[in-house]
Image (cartoon, helix red, strand yellow):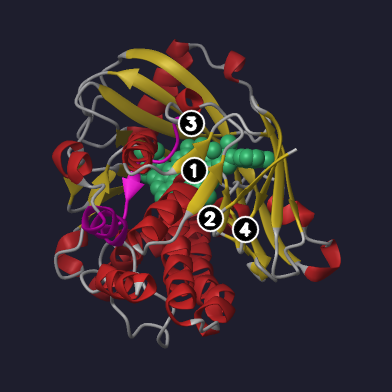
Amino acid sequence: MIRKRTQVGIVGAGPAGLVLSHLLHLAGIESVILEARSRSEVESTLRAGVLEQGTVDLLTRCGVGERLQREGFVHHGIELRFGGQPHRIALSDLTGGRAITVYPQHEVIKDLVRARVDSGGTLVFEARDVSIHDYGSTRPRIRYVCANGDQELRCDFIAGCDGFHGGCRASVPARARTEYARHYPFGWFGILVRAAPYAAELIYAHHDRGFSLVSTRSPEVQRLYFQCAPNDDTAHWPDDRIWRELQARLQTTDDWRLERGDIFQKGIIAMRSFVVEPMQYGRLFLAGDAAHIVPPTGAKGLNLAVADVYILANALAEFYASGRKEGLERYSAAALERVWRAEHFSWWMTSMLHRFEDDPFQHRLQLAQLNYVTSSRAAATALAENYVGLPLTDGMSSAGQSALAPEALTTLAHLAVSARM
Ligand code: RFL
Ligand code: PHB
């Protein structure tokens, strides 16, 4: 057994683990990331597309936003399409200039992995049988197996950033955690298409046949989704059926046409809401999908992962700089405040836009809500401010007071300096 030591052991090289490791590095704190998959798998898994303003600002301020600024698409609005009519929600006008950026998750991952490698960080890919131990004590350990054999990593803290199916959450005894979950009676069928962009902004479409979404990845590749049965199978959907279904759901009274392109990837995504409380157990801190899941309708998952680890990095920086534990003790409560807001928003968007079988009452409520959101400035503003994302907070001061976009890293940088002294 080979024994190593670090300050923070991080399980998982998704957005949560990588952003955490990078922020800790900026604060002068050492970490090691243990990731079950290979680097090329991690860098090529297709998932999210929409980054909130706060996520973009944070990545940019901490030096990993250069490609994102150059290649991402900034969108100042979204379209809600229903009753055959387009309705624009002017995100930036309604939120004092905030916007979203469409930049694929795997590109964010590539930028973060490169930044960690360039600054000499330790990332162990293809780590097998990762198990966490003694996190109730001051000397947690992580065991794993890699090409060099059995390993033990001793650390001060463990960050469980291993996604919804990872082992960290499951290692906590069931009696110590409370889980809240909701399943939806549908899934999303997602496709990637070689085609030019279909629209200048994302289209969220409500239709009697079910929900659909038009998004983008690049000038050459487009991302489309449509609501399907939860147990559906991609084999039931030859290309021609997909195009007919999308065209029917996206139809407008002035005959909007969806050009067919080459579909080169198909997949079905389950829809669920999930939260575990608390997000801390002794010296184990859960972050990102390991602690919570939202249905993708509000585009919040990756953004929440970043918001969690921003709070955690600040709390750890405070601890190493001064020995104070208040930030760490407040981590769970501070993170959960934003998590539940995003859970509500994602559930609300999902409920407003999808078809619920045989429920004409729900259908009429949806249309009433869609009409309200697209005709009342107050209602549109509520959607817009949630969609572009509430300001990041560092969890150190009382909720809502630290609108930290510019000051955020100053806090970390300040703590970093003190930590090194
Ligand atoms: P991840 O990304 O799942 O990363 C977890 C990492 O942990 C590794 N792992 C382990 N490593 C070591 N040992 C073990 N035992 C391990 N078990 C697991 C995994 O290999 C993996 O590399 O979690 P993280 O970092 O919390 O990030 C969460 C986000 O990835 C997720 O919330 C988003 O992708 C959700 N999401 C969206 N979020 C947005 O903010 N905006 C969007 O537009 C958006 N669209 C989406 C989405 C998710 C989707 N899918 C496929 C679920 C669209 C889709 C279709
Ligand atoms: C995506 O582009 O993958 C995407 C966009 C908006 C969402 C979900 C996913 O709400």
Q: Position of residue 182 (x, y in %)?
A: 67, 56
Which label's residue is closer to the chain start, 3 or 1?
Answer: 1
Q: How far apart, in angstroms, are the residues tagged by discs 3 and 1?
A: 7 Å
Q: What amino acid is labelled 1 in the image?
A: Gly
Instruction: Name which quarter of the figure residue 154 lies in.
Output: bottom right
Mark 1 or mark 4, whichever is nearer to me: 4
Residue 155 marker: 4
| Dot 2 amino acid type | Gly
The mark closer to the camera, 3 or 4, is 4
Instruction: Report whether the residue tagged 3 is closer than 8 Å to ligand 1.
Output: yes
The C terminus, quarter of image: bottom left
- Looking at the image, tell me whether mark 1 or mark 2 is earlier in sequence order: 1
Mark 1 Cβ and ligand 1 under 8 Å apart: yes
SS for dot 3: helix
The residue beneath circle 3 is 42
Spatial separation of the CA atoms under disc 2 and disc 3:
16 Å
Residue 69 at x, y = what percent?
Answer: 17, 44
Q: Which residues are magenta?
A: 46-62
Q: Which label is found at residue 14?
A: 1
Tell me the element at label 4: loop
